[in-house]
């Protein structure tokens, strides 16, 4: 099996175009056409992780955090990043990063964290805009259902928890082909007036090429008429953070102990307790300071994330209970997502969860 087959499965789940502009997801070292001897899954890639991969004959490391994040101008082994890259290249180990694209999808990092905390009725805290497009095409009645089915099969028409969504209007189409045409209906050099159905449906922008391929393959006309419009609608399946509810309300001390236990955290930083029970919870794995106002506007009783600075705790102003549970602690279960994707598609493939705790922060 080639590395490309594994990375394609990951990117089908969380397309690379969903990563943030500042990020560096994808294959960082190695080549996609290499035969893969095994995959090691981890949160971070370090020298120790390279050694672990070598020990278990894995020539692919899939990490959440990109080892190459900002630009590298030299690779001389002067820091852990350079030494890790050198060791990977010397030993023909491919490193793949699946970072903010997995943060931004509904079934990604935040859903895994929500599952560990027992949250229900989940939705994206801050959905992204401008990721959807509308397709409009015109189909003869005889091929209407065939074209619809082909479009739905490649991902058109998904709105929230609904699928196969479209709007269809009967109308009249006109066309006249020249002597070089072989029209499905009518004859060359003669005006055709035909009953057609106008089909409207939406799709995720990154699927445009495969959707147009499916449209043209299923449509009977030589020249397929279609329009594509960008939409500014928010996309509820992609965005930052997540919100949900506990099955039962918890008092604050009980809730804090619940977080410590389920996120395996040795230390929680939090704002002043408000003397009220917790039911609605906002979360963001990793650094989620930018989502504080979203959590407050949602009416969350608590917001769990990490990397808040001292003065940012003042910004809460007793509007909710803010808990900084640690960057590693809120993202540590991400490799389990990689594992589930790969094992579901490649049942017998050798894939391992790293045994190394890469958290650089220790607690005394």
Image (cartoon, helix red, strand yellow):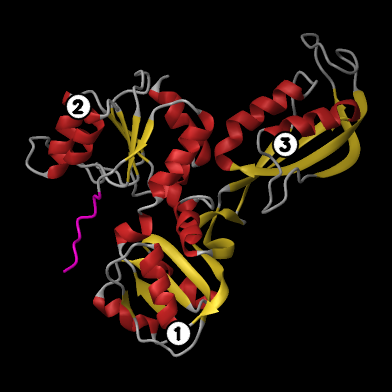
Q: Is residue 111 magenta?
A: no
Query: How far from the left and from the top, in percent, is residue 134?
Result: 68, 44
Q: Residue at x 58, y 36 (%)?
A: 207
Q: Residue at x 27, y 67 (%)?
A: 266
Dot 1 and dot 3 residues touching (CB under 8 Å): no
Question: Relative to residue 203, is residue 341 drawn left or right?
Answer: left
Q: Residue at x 27, y 25 (%)?
A: 57
Q: In this figure, which residue is indicated by the disc labeled 1?
A: 319
The residue lying toward the viewer, choosing from 167 and 68, is 68
Q: In this figure, which residue is indicated by the disc labeled 3?
A: 152
Q: Residues within 10 Å of mark 3 (few under 14, many from 20)?
A: many
Q: Earlier in the sequence, mark 2 or mark 1?
A: 2
Query: How far from the left and from the top, in percent, is residue 331?
Result: 37, 55
- The quadrant holding residue 350 is top left
Q: Residue at x 17, y 42 (%)?
A: 81
Numbered disc in front, either 2 or 3? 2
Q: Which residues are magenta?
A: 357-364
Task: Label 1: state its secondary structure.
Answer: loop
Q: Residues within 10 Å of mark 1 (few under 14, many from 20)?
A: some
Q: Earlier in the sequence, mark 1 or mark 3?
A: 3
Question: Relative to residue 190, is residue 122 drawn left or right?
Answer: left
Residue 249: mark:
none
Task: Label 2: state its secondary structure.
Answer: helix
Query: How far from the left and from the top, in percent, is residue 20?
Result: 40, 50
């Amino acid at each position: 099996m080639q590395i490309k087959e594994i990375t394609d499965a990951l990117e089908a789940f969380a397309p690379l175009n969903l990563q943030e502009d500042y990020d560096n997801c994808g294959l960082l070292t190695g080549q996609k056409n290499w035969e893969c001897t095994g995959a090691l899954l981890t949160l971070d890639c370090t020298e120790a992780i390279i050694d672990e991969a070598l020990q278990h004959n894995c020539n692919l490391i899939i990490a959440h955090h990109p080892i190459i994040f900002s630009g590298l101008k030299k690779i001389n082994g002067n820091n852990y990043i350079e030494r890790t890259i050198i060791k990977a290249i010397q030993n023909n180990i491919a490193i793949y990063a699946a970072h903010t694209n997995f943060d931004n999808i509904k079934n990604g990092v935040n859903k895994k964290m929500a599952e560990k905390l027992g949250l229900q009725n989940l939705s994206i805290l801050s959905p992204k805009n401008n990721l959807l497009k509308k397709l409009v095409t015109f189909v003869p009645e005889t091929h209407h259902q065939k074209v619809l089915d082909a479009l739905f099969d490649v991902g058109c028409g998904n709105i929230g928890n609904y699928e196969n969504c479209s709007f269809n209007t009967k109308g009249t189409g006109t066309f006249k082909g020249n002597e070089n045409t072989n029209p499905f209906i009518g004859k060359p050099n003669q005006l055709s007036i035909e009953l057609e159905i106008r089909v409207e449906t939406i799709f995720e922008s990154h699927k445009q090429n495969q959707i147009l391929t499916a449209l043209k393959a299923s449509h009977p006309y030589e020249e397929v008429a279609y329009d594509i419009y960008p939409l500014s609608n928010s996309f509820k399946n992609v965005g930052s953070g997540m919100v949900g509810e506990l099955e039962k309300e918890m008092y604050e001390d009980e809730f804090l102990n619940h977080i410590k236990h389920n996120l395996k955290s040795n230390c929680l930083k939090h704002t002043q307790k408000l003397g009220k029970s917790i039911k609605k919870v906002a979360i963001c794995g990793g650094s989620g300071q930018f989502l504080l106002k979203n959590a407050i506007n949602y009416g969350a009783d608590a917001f769990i994330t990490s990397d808040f600075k001292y003065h940012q705790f003042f910004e809460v102003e007793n509007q909710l209970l803010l808990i900084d549970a640690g960057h590693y602690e809120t993202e540590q279960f991400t490799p389990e997502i990689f594992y589930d994707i790969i094992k579901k598609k490649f049942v017998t493939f050798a894939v391992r969860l790293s045994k190394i705790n890469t958290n650089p922060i220790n607690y005394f």
